[in-house]
Structure formats: structure tokens, C-alpha cells
Image: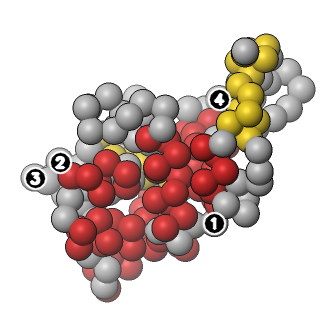
Amino acid sequence: GMTFAGHMPPLVGLDHVLESGQRSIEHLGGYSSPGSQLDAQVAATVRAGAYNCPTLAIQTILSSSARSADLRAVTGALYKAGARLLVGTDSGIDKTQPGSSIHDELEQFVNAGLTPFAALLGATRTAAEYLNQTDNIGTIGVGKEADLILVRSNPLQDIGATRKIDAVIVDGRLLN
């Protein structure tokens, strides 16, 4: 009954990971390049209800441009099929910058074919669902934790707007 998440061990394989109930797969491990095998893998992911945390921003740094393009295509295919995607950065491994890397990841999600709204959901509501914390975080509502940023323009029109932060509110208090 314990929830488990993590990398997809190559010797285990994606099919077994999904059948075993792994809740989240990091870095899109085990997914094929676009094609019929990927279509089957995406369908299996949706059936299993597994989340994926692609970490596309770090993948663009560590992988070839062809592999990065494949990973964006996988992310786009998962999105189109209705799979649950989480925005994560692998920040702290000395290749991505804490803070700014979340903006890089949101932009990569949009480059993969997600709408800005869908990308933002992966960092907010879907993340709260994954953590079983929707009563406390992930959306704005009465009685919820009030940690948010206020940006200058509409990120639904341009996801880059998340970089233009005017104010930060933590625990309901405006930070200077």
C-alpha cells in the first residue's frame, strides 16, 4: 500500500513499472521515440494513472538535440492522451539554477505542445493532486495556504511572463 515513485530502472522496463503501480516516472525513462510503440506506452500510462515528471529543461542540457526533441514529443503525446504531467527541474544537481529553472521547465512544456494553462497546472493543481494536498495547496481558495507570485502580464498568453515577478506572497504575507 505504499506509494512509490522514481526513475524507471532499465532492467525492469516501463511496462513492468506501470503494471506495478509506480505512481510517478521521472525523466520519461523507458519511453520510446515517437511511433507505434510510444502510442502503446502512452495508452498504458493513461490506463495506469501514472504521473510523469519529464524534467525537459535539464534534458536539453544533458541530452543531444535529437533526444531532447524526442522527449518533447513524448511529453506532447502524454499531454494529448490525457496523462498527468508534473513540472519538476532536478534543480540542485549543478546544471540547473534553483528558482529560474522552473521557468525554463514551463517554457519547455509549452515547446512540447502544452498550452500555457496546462503547463501551469503541472506546477500547481496537478502537483497538489499528486501529493494528495488539494485541500491545502495547488489552487487559490479560502483556507488554503497562500504562497503565490504576482506577475506583470498574463502567463496564459505568454508563459515567459512567469519570469516577470512583481510580488511574492508566502503564507499569506507580502514579501518585500
Residue lying at 43% horizontally and 65% vertically, measured from the top left? 75
Asked which quadrant contains residue 5, the reply is top left
Q: Amino acid at mark 1?
A: Thr
Q: CA distance from mark 1 to mark 3?
A: 34 Å
Please say if the residues under marks 2 and 3 sit with CB atoms less than 8 Å apart: yes
CA neighbours of label 2 inside 10 A, class few (<14), some (14 to 19), many (20+)? few
Residue lying at 24% horizontally and 68% vertically, measured from the top left? 65
Which residue lies under the disc numbered 3? Answer: 11
Q: CA distance from mark 2 to mark 1?
A: 30 Å
Q: Amino acid at mark 3?
A: Leu
First in sequence: mark 1 vs mark 3: 3
Which residue lies under the disc numbered 1? Answer: 115
Residue lying at 25% horizontally and 32% vertically, measured from the top left? 94
Which residue lies under the disc numbered 2? Answer: 9
Helix, strand or loop under label 1: loop
From the viewer's side, name the closer residue of 159 and 54.
Answer: 159
Please say if the residues under marks 2 and 1 sit with CB atoms less than 8 Å apart: no
First in sequence: mark 2 vs mark 4: 2
From the viewer's side, name the closer residue of 108 and 138.
Answer: 108
